[in-house]
Image (cartoon, grey):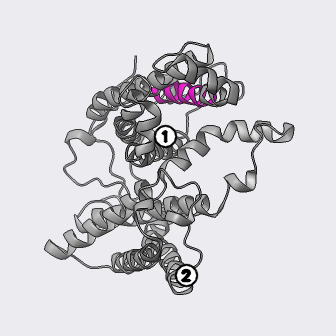
Amino acid sequence: MTTITDSPPRRAAGTRLRLAAPLAAAWLGGWGLLAGVSSLTGSGYPFGANDPHGEASLLRLVPVHLGAPLFAGVLLLAAVAALLMSRTGTVRGLPRALLLGYGWAVAFGLAVVVPDGRVLVILGYLPMLIIGAPFGWPPVDYADVFDWPLLARCCALVGAVLLAGALLVWQRRTAGACPACGRDDDERGWTSPAAAARWGRWAAYTAAVIPLSYAVVRFAWAAGIPFGISADFLREMRETGLVWAGAGLAAFATIGAILTLGLVRPWGERFPRWMVGLAGRRVPITLAVVPAALVAISVTAATLGLISLPKFWELSGGFSLTTAPMLLWPLWGMALGAATVAYHLRRRGACGRCRRPWPGPVPRRR
């Protein structure tokens, strides 16, 4: 019988697993306490009527005097749940279902409901903001862009990631699977490399087509073609410069669509030959998974707030070529998330903790 030594990578993986729940509890508890202080002092709550850019946020529907105590209660209870998940022992039945249900609901709220469309907009404009800052373009007040409400949204995303990580580890452990990779002794079905390659390909192509449809409309406007809008409205956008901002977002969407295809193409696994210094090297899994997951979450969050905004429908004139690509954003977010999961399932090797290999060979790409 072969003895598996406790190697440094294996010890490091074990440390990360043990710290997942305490880190989530500390983060959520800290923000819960801040929300409690905000509810007592009546200041500092960054959402609703206190957010000057929150017109497309679902949190605008929550009165300010209720928002802070609500956040405090939800976050502190989630912190307690994370602490319970840090305890060893077997949990079955209804208690396990309740803990997982509440935890995943909070993680979803922090990742999708709280951030709204500002995170996606900032991601889209960030290259222009960084490159144009030394030249004073675009003419914006950076203090007004990167404000406290935006920071709070980003902190909510961090909390969602930490809580989701703790939930995933605990869910796997209590189900008898490896807490690091989720494999058990009978791994089959949709998580196998062959299955992930099949459904991941459809997900990736879907996630690439939708942003391209959005980009085509915006590029048409930049070219002076009133695609889906009136000529007067296009002239107004060209005079105010909004059409060029839309072209920038279209370029970002096009680049994103191309990179999405990398989740199912060989150059998404090994750097292409034209990349000097990196050609032929394996693409780190996290280099593809982390940005794709962030965009998937941001797209989904942006859509929920946008389609619930009456002003959006008034300005766009109802369902049209202008709004149709954006109404597909929920599908874009889900498809991109699925393609990202498939990429991870297809490329990961043997687990560094349980040492379980894949149940079959990874399909060769043609």
Place of residue 160 in the rendered image (x, y in percent of width and height, measured from the top left): 44, 61
Q: Dot 2: within a 10 Å radius of its alpha carbon, few (fewer than 14), some, or many (20 or more) residues? A: few
Q: CA distance from mark 2 to mark 1?
A: 38 Å
Place of residue 277 in the rendered image (x, y in percent of width and height, measured from the top left): 71, 28
Determine whether 206 is above or below 132 in the image: above
Question: Circle 1 sits on which residue?
Answer: 292
Place of residue 124 in the rendered image (x, y in percent of width and height, measured from the top left): 60, 38
Determine whether 201 is above or below 353 in the image: above
Is 259 or 120 nearer to us in this picture?
A: 120
Is 84 or 213 nearer to us in this picture?
A: 213
Q: Amino acid at mark 1?
A: Ala
Position of 161 with respect to 273 (left or right) is: left
Picture residue at 35% right of the left edge, 29% below the top: 319
Residue 47 makes an appearance in the image: no
Q: Tell me the tag on residue 198.
A: none
Numbered range of the magenta stretch: 248-261
User: Which residue occupies the extreme right position in the image?
Assistant: 135
Q: Quadrant of residue 106?
A: bottom left
User: Which residue occupies the extreme left position in the image?
Assistant: 93
- The magenta stretch spans residue 5: no
Is 70 or 55 nearer to us in this picture?
A: 55
Question: Circle 2 sits on which residue?
Answer: 42
Determine whether 270 is above or below 176 in the image: above
Q: Secondary structure at mark 1?
A: helix
Place of residue 87 in the rendered image (x, y in percent of width and height, measured from the top left): 34, 80
Marked residue nearer the N-terminal end (2 or 1): 2
Picture residue at 52% right of the left edge, 75% below the top: 31
